[in-house]
């Protein structure tokens, strides 16, 4: 079994600790803590003194600002050093500045709670932690050596050599135990708080929702361009071809060519209409979810029973997400499930739209099979909804979606 921390290795199997690398890693962790802590303390004390003395000049304010931001650099090294005794990395709580440049970085760091928490950790480390590292190393290594060598001056004190030897044998446990405790305290102080993670998650969700909204807006624009532009021109061309046929003898070769061209234009118009429905159905914008899903059912190769009862129209992102859930589910049922019937059910409960699509096919649907379910789940998640899939081998398949309508 591979242990993730020195504390875990010592607590689970202390007999094997001596044969592992954890005591040596712990020793390196404490030695580097003493070295880095002493240097950091000396530099910060000198910088703080110089900043206070030169505060009358403008230079002192810059020095004190550097001291305030020193925790960012110190804790970055601490997070890297922590990997000696804790294999799980501590996430960096800082976010990237909105703009480039040192001033944007400075404003961002000064406004973050993590910056001041890291300054507090630096103060605790400088005043207590590295001193305790030094104390533990002295007790675990220096004291046993002094006790063992005391009989050299007083031969009658030979029992102290045994005591020193026993203390030295216990040194790996002492060092590993304190290194594990020290690492736990460091992780506790440096791990981002829930409020900070919550803000990051909120930003990510908002960004993802904006991307989905922008994508849907672009789909609607493309649908309008197809409907009002290319489609209308093709309809006009079809009418011109029809007028040309009226002016042409019906038994001529040109009349047959015009008829063939008119049939081809009619086919292109139908395909373009189908394409525009796939991009963003006009019925969804004009009439709502029930009408748009009804059109999907009418064009489906499978019999589809639609039971959608909604008391009012919902927000555009909710209707769009629900529509494409149904469209993807019907496409999967037609292509993969060997189903003979599909049922679509939707209700609006207070501020939540519940939507389910079921079929009597062979089942076995899974996001890993590449049937578009991953993209569908991402779209539902972007709308802060939940998607659940039940599709055991042999069927039936049930896709259940809940979308908030706040």
Image: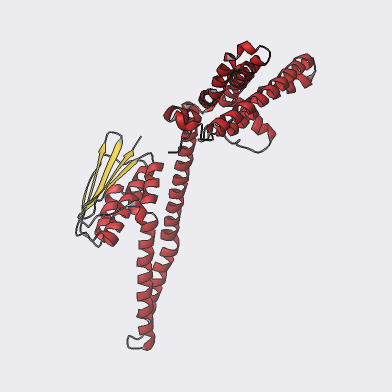
Residue 94 appears in view: no
Does 379 sit left or right of 107 as displayed?
A: left
Q: Nearer the viewer, residue 218 or 120?
A: 120
Q: How many marks?
A: 0
Q: Nearer the viewer, residue 169 or 72?
A: 169
Question: What is the quadrant of residue 53 in the picture?
Answer: top right
Q: Which of 62 and 132 is in front in this view?
A: 132
Does 143 sit left or right of 230 as displayed?
A: right
Q: What is the residue that sits farthest to the front in this orientation?
A: 156
Please tell me whether residue 370 is drawn above or below residue 234 in the rendered image: above
Q: Quadrant of the N terminus?
A: top left
User: What residue is rendered at 28% in x and 56% in y?
Assistant: 330
- The figure's colour scheme reads secondary structure
In the rendering, at what x and y percent does residue 213 appear?
44, 45
Does 278 sit left or right of 20 as displayed?
A: left
Question: What is the quadrant of residue 48 in the picture?
Answer: top right
User: What residue is rendered at 30% in x and 48% in y?
Assistant: 289
Q: Quadrant of the C terminus?
A: top left
Q: Which of 220 and 30 is in front in this view?
A: 30
In the rendering, at what x and y percent does residue 38 appear?
68, 22
Please tell me whether residue 29 is drawn above or below residue 318 in the rendered image: above
Please tell me whether residue 163 is drawn above or below residue 373 in the rendered image: above
In the rendering, at what x and y percent does residue 378 appear?
40, 46
Residue 224 appears in view: yes
In the rendering, at what x and y percent does residue 80 appear?
59, 34
User: What residue is rendered at 50% in x and 34% in y?
Assistant: 200
């Amino acid at each position: 079994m591979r242990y993730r921390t020195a504390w875990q290795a010592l607590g689970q199997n202390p007999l094997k600790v001596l044969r592992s690398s954890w005591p040596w890693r712990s020793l390196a962790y404490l030695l580097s803590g003493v070295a880095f802590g002493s240097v950091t303390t000396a530099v910060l004390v000198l910088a703080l003194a110089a900043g206070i003395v030169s505060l009358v000049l403008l230079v002192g304010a810059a020095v004190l600002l550097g001291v305030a931001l020193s925790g960012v650099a110190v804790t970055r090294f601490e997070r890297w050093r922590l990997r000696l005794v804790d294999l799980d990395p501590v996430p960096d709580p800082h976010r990237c500045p909105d703009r480039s440049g040192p001033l944007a970085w400075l404003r961002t760091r000064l406004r973050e709670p993590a910056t001041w928490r890291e300054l507090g950790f630096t103060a605790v480390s400088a005043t207590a932690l590295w001193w305790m590292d030094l104390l533990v190393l002295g007790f675990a290594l220096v004291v046993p050596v002094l006790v063992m060598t005391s009989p050299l001056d007083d031969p009658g004190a030979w029992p102290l050599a045994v005591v020193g030897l026993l203390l030295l044998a216990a040194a790996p446990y002492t060092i590993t135990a304190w290194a594990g405790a020290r690492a736990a305290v460091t992780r506790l102080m440096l791990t981002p708080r829930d409020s900070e993670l919550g803000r990051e998650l909120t930003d990510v969700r908002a960004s993802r929702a904006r991307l989905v909204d922008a994508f849907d807006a672009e789909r609607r624009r493309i649908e309008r361009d197809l409907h009002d532009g290319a489609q209308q021109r093709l309809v006009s061309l079809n009418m011109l071809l029809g007028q040309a046929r009226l002016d042409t003898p019906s038994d001529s070769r040109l009349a047959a060519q015009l008829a063939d061209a008119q049939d081809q234009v009619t086919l292109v118009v139908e395909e373009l209409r189908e394409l525009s429905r796939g991009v963003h159905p006009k019925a969804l914008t004009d009439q709502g979810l029930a009408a748009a899903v009804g059109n999907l059912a009418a064009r489906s190769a499978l019999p589809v029973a639609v039971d959608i009862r909604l008391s009012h129209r919902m927000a555009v992102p909710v209707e769009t997400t629900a529509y494409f859930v149904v469209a993807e589910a019907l496409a999967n049922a037609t292509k993969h499930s060997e189903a003979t019937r599909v049922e679509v059910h939707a209700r609006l409960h207070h501020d939540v739209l519940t939507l389910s699509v079921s079929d009597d096919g062979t089942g076995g649907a899974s996001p890993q099979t590449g049937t578009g379910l991953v993209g569908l789940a991402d779209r539902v998640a972007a709308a802060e909804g939940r998607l659940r899939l039940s599709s055991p081998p042999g069927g039936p398949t049930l896709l259940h979606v809940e979308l908030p309508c706040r």
